Image (spheres, rainbow, N blue to C red):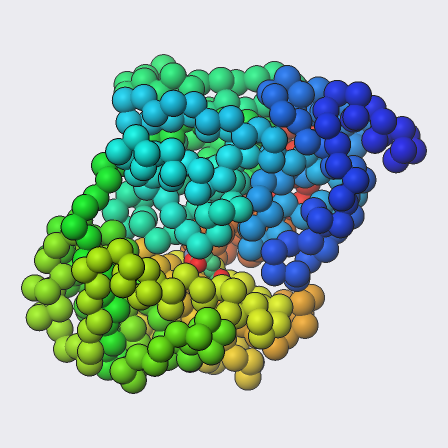
Amino acid sequence: MPVSDLREALSAVSATSDDLAGVETDWTGRVTGRALAVALPSTVDEVAAVLGVCRAQGVRVTVRGGGTGLVAGAVPDDTVVLSTRRLDQVGPVQDGSLVAGAGVTLRTVQDRARRAGWDYGVDFASRDTATVGGSVVTNAGGVHVVAHGTTRAQVLGVEAVLADGSVVRRLAGLAKDATGYDLGQLMVGSEGTLGVVTAVRLRLVPRLTGLETALVGVASVADAVALVAAVKQRAAGLRAAELLLPEGVALVREVAGLPALTPAAAYVLLEAQGGLEDALGQVDVVDAAVALDAASAERLWAYRERMTEAISTLGVPHKLDVSLPFGQLGPFLAALPGALGGHTAHVFGHVGDGNLHVNVLGPDPEDETVDDAVLRLAASMGGSIGAEHGVGRHKRPWLHLSRTPAELAAMRAVKTALDPDGLLNPGVLLP
Ligand code: 2HG
Ligand code: ZN
């Protein structure tokens, strides 16, 4: 079918967009693909109808949320882009949860929750653009995983359209429901390969008050890890434990115009409801800036929040999001330079979760030598090659480092059962 006819068939069942370029590249600019058309369904029936047109025409579909993903999981490959942007309904807060459409931004969920006296347990810097749907299918983490777990732990129910157009809908959010396979949780982390998530019931968390925030300089990475271990044990209501290194701090200061910090070998940004002082007394600390009100806390958070943006001013980074057993963080960072082939890397991340973001600068976008070396290093130390950004297109060749042959076979069997023709998100996740 000519592309013009395909677009006409799609526009008969859903709104479409002519802005193909806006959906063809990943956030980092590292990968660009080709979109045949962009469909913007605004109801679950329209999503099913878009899939119906694509199925009938033998054209595959790439599902796209806010486009803030970092593994090229929503970059088209001669596919129709199904944008979830218009699935933007939010229901009322009820019994500590709410239902949000896949296209609702994280910020909107947080605002709705806070207005009702609750909070949402997931937060990260791209909150204004990142969508609920994208965060669910990548099982996104962010800065509060130490307190509330990843997105998976917030999902109480899911509505999704399967490849054959049928709709699975379990949004009631019953606290107990032991009636077999949890199809909603199956969609979490599926990267859009098993169905199009259209709405989710999200668990909300109590709104914490009296938070203390501290940006602590320490003499070594080992001290940073020891500090986080002490805080985990002593600080009630630990909400964030983030690692920064001096090179990253210097870069973010330059880009964001932030004041100098006392020189240190590593910095840990901590947020807790209490007990920080006691924990800080247990380890050697070079310096600690403590914020007791929201405005000064925001100033401390800026060093961490603006890191991704600061790094992107240097070029197109190779983003390698890995997690490690807690005890291997120090050894991994010590061994990392040997895996970089002479290139430089900015490393930061969610040290409380054993999750580091290795941003390598220098290699050509298509040169995967350094990706291979860093991911193998993490896997060899018992870590994961994809901690919270997913696998997408980027990390597909290395999935076998984190998943056994038996697991990969089971994953493929599930994919084949639910999407036998490979309609959804081809080229994503599965090797
Ligand atoms: C963060 O923690 C995000 O800020 C992005 O996961 C990480 O830019 C990155 O590498
Ligand atoms: Zn992160």
Q: Up-down: is 424 above or below 349?
A: above
Image coordinates of residue 49 in percent, x first then y, are 71, 20
The residue lying at 39 percent from left, 74 percent from top is: 258
The image quadrant of residue 162 is top right
> In front here: 342 or 104?
104
Image coordinates of residue 3 in percent, x first then y, are 88, 35
> In front here: 168 or 271?
271
The image quadrant of residue 325 is bottom left
> In front here: 138 or 216?
216
The residue lying at 55 percent from left, 80 percent from top is: 343
The picture quadrant for ligand 2 comes to bottom left
The number of numbered badges drawn on the structure is: 0
240 sits left or right of 55 in the view = left
406 sits left or right of 244 in the view = right
- Most distant residue in the right direction: 2
The residue lying at 32 percent from left, 48 percent from top is: 145
The residue lying at 48 percent from left, 52 percent from top is: 126
Residue 268 visible in this rendered orientation of the protein: yes
Image coordinates of residue 314 in percent, x first then y, are 58, 74
The image quadrant of residue 297 is bottom left
Q: Up-down: is 18 above or below 402?
A: above
208 sits left or right of 421 in the view = left
Image coordinates of residue 341 in percent, x first then y, are 56, 80
Q: Up-down: is 184 above or below 394?
A: above
